[in-house]
Image (cartoon, grey):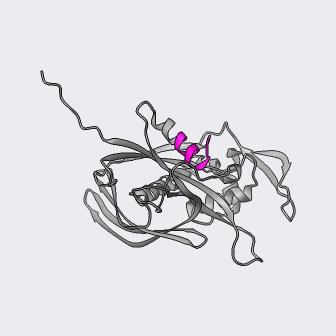
Amino acid sequence: MKKEVFFRPSVTIDSIVFTVRDVNVDNYRKLPEKKFQVLLVKRAGEPYKDKWSLPGTFVGEKESFEEAVNRCLEEKANIKDIYLEQLYSWGNPLRDPRERVISTSYMGLVDSNNIQIKAGKNVEEIEWFNIKLKTIQEKRTDRKDGYYKTEQIEIILENKEIVLKSKVEVVKELVNGNLIIYTQILQSDLAFDHAKMLVYAIERLKNKVEYTTIAFHLMPEKFTLTKLQQVYEILLDKPLLKANFRRKIADMVIETEEYEENAGHRPSKLYQFNTHFQPHVF
């Protein structure tokens, strides 16, 4: 019997690492503002030389995806031991101009105050970019068995004088309770299909904030409740009432005997995550 020969595509991983950082504003009288940011690297080689992209790498022949993503972040960004979650696989035959490459994306969350990013292997530069998302067009058609919805999203990534713009169309089709989501890039300043990966990761993160404790991976070991609320507001993209917020996160945190240092005002109590907490809908 003739042995069947199968096509063997290359396999990569790409990492979408988020943080929330204090960023100085132009007005010297204002305190730094917290910004939702993503880590990007400037590519040193082809394809897309000198383009900004998500950190990624080819998976070794005897390497697991988890080993590959951890190696990538350590080699290219000097990052290790952070929260990582596998998100989705991207397999468009034309997504990489070199050859057929299938990529699996990972979402990472980190308190950036505890790390020092550094450009490493095959990287010219590495920077945190502020994230702004804006829906510029939306249309929904209801059907008997569900709905069909299209949404055009503009992504603006900023770091000082660098501004990267992308536009992605997200199509959601609900049929008999089954939700199908697919996206296409209309325009992008990012390499490969990384604009699609970024939009997908942001939506996944925002959804998980509602029913998990995932936001705590963006916090230091000890924090004030005010700063925790600011992070939730950034991720949910809406203001939260202080009393309601503190009531809902009361079981998630443990009060310490320590106070915030160098606050410039009446010091606030520090809290830490309650590792015994059982998540509920936020």
Indicate the position of residue 57 as horizontal and vertical percent values.
46, 45
Q: Which residues are magenta?
A: 70-80
- Residue plotted at (41% across, 60% down): 48
- Is 83 situated left or right of 253 in this image? left
Q: Which quarter shows the N terminus?
A: top left
- Residue plotted at (28% across, 38% down): 8
Residue 210 visible, this orientation:
no
Residue found at the very far left of the displayed protein: 1
Residue found at the very far top of the displayed protein: 1
The residue closer to the viewer here, 48 or 266, is: 48
Indicate the position of residue 270 as horizontal and vertical percent values.
79, 50
How many numbered discs sit on the rendered protein? 0
The residue closer to the viewer here, 265 or 177, is: 265
The residue closer to the viewer here, 31 or 241, is: 31
Indicate the position of residue 147 as horizontal and vertical percent values.
30, 61
In magenta stretch: residue 71: yes
Indicate the position of residue 184 as horizontal and vertical percent values.
33, 61
Determine whether 178 is above or below 136 in the image. Answer: above
- Residue plotted at (63% across, 58% down): 20
* Location of residue 185 (image quadrant): bottom left
The residue closer to the viewer here, 108 or 9, is: 9
- Residue plotted at (67% across, 36% down): 276
- Is 27 situated left or right of 67 in this image? right
Q: Main secondary structure of the magenta part?
A: helix
Residue 122 visible, this orientation:
yes
Determine whether 121 is above or below 229 in the image. Answer: above
In magenta stretch: residue 8: no
